[in-house]
Amino acid sequence: MWTFFHKLASPPHFYDLAAKFIPWFAVLGFVFVAYGTVAGLFFAPADYQQGDAFRIIYVHVPAAYLSMMAYMIMAVSAGIGLVWRIKLSHAVAAAAAPLGAWFTFLALATGSIWGRPMWGTWWEWGDPRLTSELIMLFLYFGYMALRAAIDDPAKADKASAVLALVGAVNIPIIHFSVEWWSSLHQGATLIREGGPAIQTSMLYPLLAMIFGFTFLFGALLLGRVRTEVLFRERRSRWVYNLVLPDEGRG
Amino acid sequence: MNEMLAMGNYGAYVWSSFGLTLIVLVACVIQGINRHKSVFHDVKTRIRAMESES
């Protein structure tokens, strides 16, 4: 077990293994998203309150869920890197940030587009769910700006890890905001007491979209971690052999 | 068909959400690939430069 983890955390081994997983994740993600999109747009019945506008849920919820998942991956990896000094985990944290920012942007944008016909407004300042999600976008930007501002990679890893960990208090705030405070935002559909509040013909496409987005995110993340590992290991023998395979001195 | 695409007069909202999602996902893929290529190229150039110095 431990030898497995040890091997996985070795940069050249990870670099090769990730390349093998990426196409599988991409294909699985594509299949799930294709089914979820078609079933969600054309086969799921219209919502009795929201009509066809509810279909925005099929892109909004996966984007919002992954925006938070990316943050947790970033914070946990950064924490592991800080405590156990595993180089790969800092690479994972650094790779998760830009993707997390993209998915947060997507959650905010699709939420805004959904809010316009349902709430009558694109944006509501002071709404706890909207504001805490926006704060997460700024945490991602802050994390990336901090990394970019520090030249010494080890120092950048440490400083940005602290920022990521402190900012993690925002995650439960986002999740519970709709329960703790009154919000325009509707309550949880899936993860709630009494099970999912949605009928199966609407639920299955949503679950497919969530799985599909997760696989696509996985493929994107693995790709970015590879780039990060390549750069960090640029002075190593294995990278030398990788970039100059025919001229190598072995 | 037109009725399906109209999404009960919410078409503009539904389609722009899905369209934006597609654009962001494609942008993520392209950005990732471009960054990997440029890092690979930089690392290679740097190693080549060091080789010729030594």
Image (tube, rainbow, N blue to C red):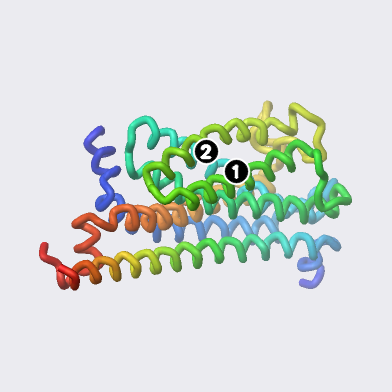
In the picture, residue A239 is in which quadrant? bottom left
In the picture, residue A136 is in which quadrant? top right
Specify the amino acid type for callout 2: Ala
Q: Residue A60: horizontal and vertical position, in percent?
A: 68, 51
The residue labelled by disc 1 is A139
Q: Residue A35: horizontal and vertical position, in percent?
A: 58, 58
Compare marks 1 and 2 and give the one earlier in the sequence: 1
Marks 1 and 2 in Cβ contact (< 8 Å): yes
- A133 left or right of A181? left
Tell me which residue sits at (80%, 65%) in the image: B12
Q: Secondary structure at mark 1?
A: helix
**Chain of the residue where label 1 is placed in the rendered structure:** A
Q: Nearer the viewer, residue A20 or A148?
A: A148
To the question of a shared chain for discs 1 and 2, the answer is yes
The residue labelled by disc 2 is A164
Tell me which residue sits at (38%, 48%) in the image: A153
